Image (cartoon, rainbow, N blue to C red):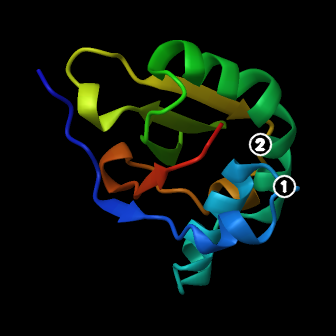
Amino acid sequence: MPRQDPPFRRASSESQDSDRSRSSISSSLRSFFSDDRRSESSVPETFLEQLEPVWDRKIVPLLIESFGRKAVLHTIFYDGDDEVIMEVWDPKYVRTIEAQVFKFRGISPKDARHFVAKRSQAKVLELRDWN
């Protein structure tokens, strides 16, 4: 049975091009979440700081192995009680290639409240040039 994907929202590539020294995921995420004008839904800086060091070393190699280098991927973030869950998938192969799921523990309750509690309410981020 195909999964119900949350609403889609494309990240701006302008911030990705503006600062190549930072990982492309942090640029994409910063751009994506800063577009949301409601402060209660913005991603806390502390979460992005936790994500940055593991992105290139641990997450990107798994994504390349699962989806290849050229794939445009979709990702969502949501609160999983004592962790933030990130799901990444290739929208072209949603029925044949499983999503990669990453769990980030140690997020303070204050920071975790910025993420939706229900997966179905999470906004979809399109990741381009993620590797």
Asked which secondary structure carries label 1, the reply is: loop
Q: Residue 86 appears in which quarter of the rendering?
A: top right
Residue drawn at the location 56% of the way across and 36% of the way down: 85
Q: Nearer the viewer, residue 53 or 102?
A: 53
Q: Three-letter amino acid code at disc 1? A: Arg
Please tell me whether residue 131 is drawn above or below residue 78 in the rendered image: above
Reading the image, the residue beneath label 1 is: 22
Q: Given the current orientation, which residue lies at the most extreme bottom position?
A: 37
Q: Nearer the viewer, residue 83 or 31?
A: 31
Badge count: 2
Residue drawn at the location 82% of the way across and 25% of the way down: 57
The N terminus, quarter of image = top left
Q: Residue 110 appears in which quarter of the rendering?
A: bottom right
Please tell me whether residue 7 is drawn above or below residue 53 in the rendered image: below
Please tell me whether residue 119 is drawn above or below residue 28 in the rendered image: above
Q: Position of residue 71 (x, y in %)?
A: 44, 34
Q: Position of residue 70 (x, y in %)?
A: 48, 33
Asked which secondary structure carries label 2, the reply is: helix
Closer to viewer: mark 1 or mark 2: 1
Residue drawn at the location 46% of the way across and 21% of the way down: 67
Q: Three-letter amino acid code at disc 2? A: Leu
Reading the image, the residue beneath label 2 is: 51
Query: Marks 1 and 2, Cα distance to the nearest angstrom?
Result: 12 Å
- Are the residues at dot 1 and dot 2 in contact (C-beta closer than 8 Å)? no
Residue 67 falls left or right of residue 18: left
User: Is disc 2 surrounded by few (<14), some (14 to 19) or many (20+) residues within 10 Å?
Assistant: some
Residue 113 falls left or right of residue 106: left
Q: Position of residue 73 (x, y in %)?
A: 44, 40
Q: Position of residue 4 (x, y in %)?
A: 20, 40
Q: Nearer the viewer, residue 97 or 50?
A: 97
Query: Which one is earlier in the sequence, the residue at label 1 or at label 2?
Result: 1
Residue 74 falls left or right of residue 28: left
